[in-house]
Amino acid sequence: MVDKRLTVCSPWSSRLSMAGVSRRLFDDVRDLIESARHQVARAVNTGLVLLYWNVGRRIRKGLLQDKRASYGERILPTLSAKLVPEYGEGFSERNLARMVQFAERFPDMKIVSTLSGQLGWSHFVEIFSFEDALKRNFYAEMCRIERWSVRTLRAKIGSMLFERTALSKKPAKLAAMELEKLRMADKLSPDLVFRDPYFLDFLGLKGTYQEKDLEAAILREMEAFILELGIGFTFVARQKRIMVGPDDFYLDLLFYHRGLRRLVAMELKLDKFRPEYKGQMELYLRWLEKHERKTGEQTPLGLILCAGKSDEQVELLQLGKSGIRVAHYLTELPPRKVLEKKLHDAIQLARERLAIAQGKRE
């Protein structure tokens, strides 16, 4: 008896067979079409971005040559009135002003050309409004290397990602050098990956809770937690067993970061950072380096997430030399203005400390 299940075909596959066209042929042709569409879309995007940059540069050149205030006030509305009937609202007075700002904030055409391979005009509109050049370049390069959508970019800006990175707390010159390395070699550094504080409000933890509750909530909301950690993190294990002689220890969470090519050990603490946490994490990192590190990987890093920390303690312990980062987390976010002030104050204080330390070395 013939098994009827073997003879059942979808209407789609029947039509292909009747026409003498294999499914594989159809899929191959469709892939070619989709690939070409994608390439055309990227080419159009790059062309549009470079057009807007060139238009902005040309207008800016005219404004700089003729320094009369009246000329500057008239040029954009007059030019827009002539362009819009022929080329559409994309050349409105407001958009022309954006193009001028674009060329002013991103003066290097080579950099713009490279970024336009991943960033569209809407990305640039979100970025070039920042007065801080370091902040602009950070978001532009992270957009490029992590391929953020405009929606993701807005979310990152809204969560004050730049202000929460170690990069923002460095002197401007050193931070610019680090971004230049990222631009030239696509090489992420820990200062670009790790942040402080981490926003864990999505875990829904309020009032009194235990470490196991925090860990369980993170595992339950792992997708959201990894989004907060940043692109590149992959979950490896929870309560990783670490055997040292007759003793067993358990690491709360273990991740791997593809960009850094490192294992990342994570410990969760309900209280403020304590100096003894350093020794515990150093033990875990040395064990991971000896037993888990693969050929081609960098030395494992540690992240201790605490409810709070003393920057002076962290500085005196020189945790960076041991590959350890300490950050505090927030399960309930304060009002935005309060949070902004805290982050800006932390950035200013960190830069002052680094400047003092650098002065002592010199």
Image: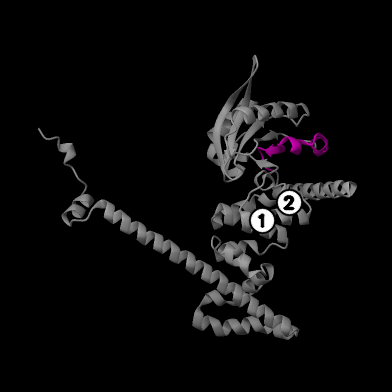
Relative image position of residue 272 (x, y in whole percent) = 75, 31
The amino acid sitting under disc 1 is Phe
On the image, numbered disc 2 is attached to which residue? 168
**Magenta span contains residue 32:** no
Helix, strand or loop status at disc 2: helix
**Whether residue 214 is situated above or below residue 184 in the rendered picture:** above
Q: Specify the quadrant of the image occupied by residue 70.
A: bottom right
Label 2 crowd bin: few (<14), some (14–19), many (20+), radius 10 Å? many
Asked whether residue 270 appears in the rendered view, the answer is no
Q: Is residue 11 left or right of residue 308?
A: left
Residue furthest to the top in view is 246
Relative image position of residue 137 (x, y in whole percent) = 67, 59
Q: Specify the quadrant of the image occupied by residue 291.
A: top right
On the image, numbered disc 1 is attached to which residue? 138
**Whether residue 16 is situated above or below residue 105 in the rendered picture:** above
User: Which residue: 77% across, 49% down?
Assistant: 347
User: Which residue: 75% across, 39% down?
Assistant: 320
Asked whether residue 75 appears in the rendered view, the answer is yes
**Whether residue 259 is situated above or below residue 123 in the rendered picture:** above
**Whether residue 201 is situated above or below residue 148 in the rendered picture:** above
* Marking on residue 83: none
Disc 1, disc 2: CB below 8 Å? Answer: yes
Q: Nearer the viewer, residue 93 or 322?
A: 322
Q: Nearer the viewer, residue 55 or 88?
A: 55
Label 1 crowd bin: few (<14), some (14–19), many (20+), radius 10 Å? many
The amino acid sitting under disc 2 is Ser
- Provide the residue span drawn in magenta: 311-333
The first of marks 1 and 2 along the sequence is 1
Scheme by which the image is coloured: one colour
Helix, strand or loop status at disc 1: helix
Relative image position of residue 216 (x, y in whole percent) = 57, 29
Q: Nearer the viewer, residue 112 or 5?
A: 112
